[in-house]
Image (spheres, helix red, strand yellow):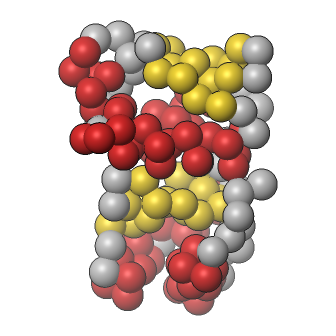
């Protein structure tokens, strides 16, 4: 399980106060705060007309996305929702490692980010959620 920092706990509390949706999965990737909530609670967390998301963004002063929690068979969908609009051809767990095939150099550059910052953020997320290492090819 990922380590919760004071900042992460603050973000989670803001989500809970605004939406009454509970989660323990919150992370930052590419200057966006992501909340992973159960599939049945995504619509409630977003709110009508994205009212809750907008309120949270104002309170935090950061872009916010609410995504569905990862399922055992939903690795590709989970990672895709984090790195969008960057696309990749496949993502699968092999031998204790999540292997993402970028497809082309532009997609790979988008996944890695400047000075591999996005890659490091994504590695932390993958370790916390799936308990495996990440490799982008």
35 shown above or below 114 = below
Query: How far across and how far down the image is residue 81, in percent?
Result: 46, 41
Q: Where, quadrant-wise, is the N terminus in this rendering?
A: bottom right
Q: Quadrant of the C terminus?
A: top left
The residue at the point 32 percent across, 67 percent down is 63
Determine whether, in the image, residue 26 is placed left or right of residue 90.
right
Task: Tally the marks.
Answer: 0
Quadrant housing residue 26: bottom right
**Which residue appears at 46% of the width and 60% of the height?**
28
Q: Residue furthest front?
A: 115
- Taking 123 as reference, is 135 above or below it? above
Residue 43 position within the rendered picture, expressed as x and y whole percent measured from the top left: 54, 61
* Residue 15 showing in the rendered view: no
Image location (x, y in percent) of residue 122:
50, 42
Depth order, front residue of 54/33: 33
In this rendered view, identify the residue nearer to me: 70 or 20.
70
Question: Given the current orientation, which residue lies at the most extreme left position?
Answer: 106
Q: Quadrant of residue 55?
A: bottom left
Quarter of the image where one finds residue 86? top left
Q: Which one is nearer the viewer's eye here, 103 or 56? A: 103
Which residue is located at x 58 percent, y 47 percent? 124
- The front one of 121 and 16 is 121
- Residue drawn 59% across and 47% down? 125
Can residue 93 be seen here? The reply is yes
């Amino acid at each position: 399980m990922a380590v919760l920092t004071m900042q992460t706990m603050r973000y989670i509390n803001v989500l809970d106060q605004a939406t009454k949706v509970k989660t323990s999965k919150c992370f930052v990737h590419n200057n966006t705060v992501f909340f992973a909530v159960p599939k049945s609670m995504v619509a409630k967390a977003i709110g009508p007309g994205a009212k809750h998301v907008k309120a949270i963004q104002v309170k935090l002063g950061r872009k916010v996305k609410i995504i569905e929690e990862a399922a055992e068979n939903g690795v590709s969908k989970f990672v895709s929702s984090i790195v969008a609009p960057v696309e990749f051809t496949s993502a699968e767990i092999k031998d204790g490692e999540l292997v993402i095939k970028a497809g082309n150099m532009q997609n790979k550059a988008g996944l890695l980010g400047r000075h591999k910052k996005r890659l490091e953020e994504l590695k932390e997320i993958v370790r916390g959620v799936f308990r495996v290492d990440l490799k982008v090819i």
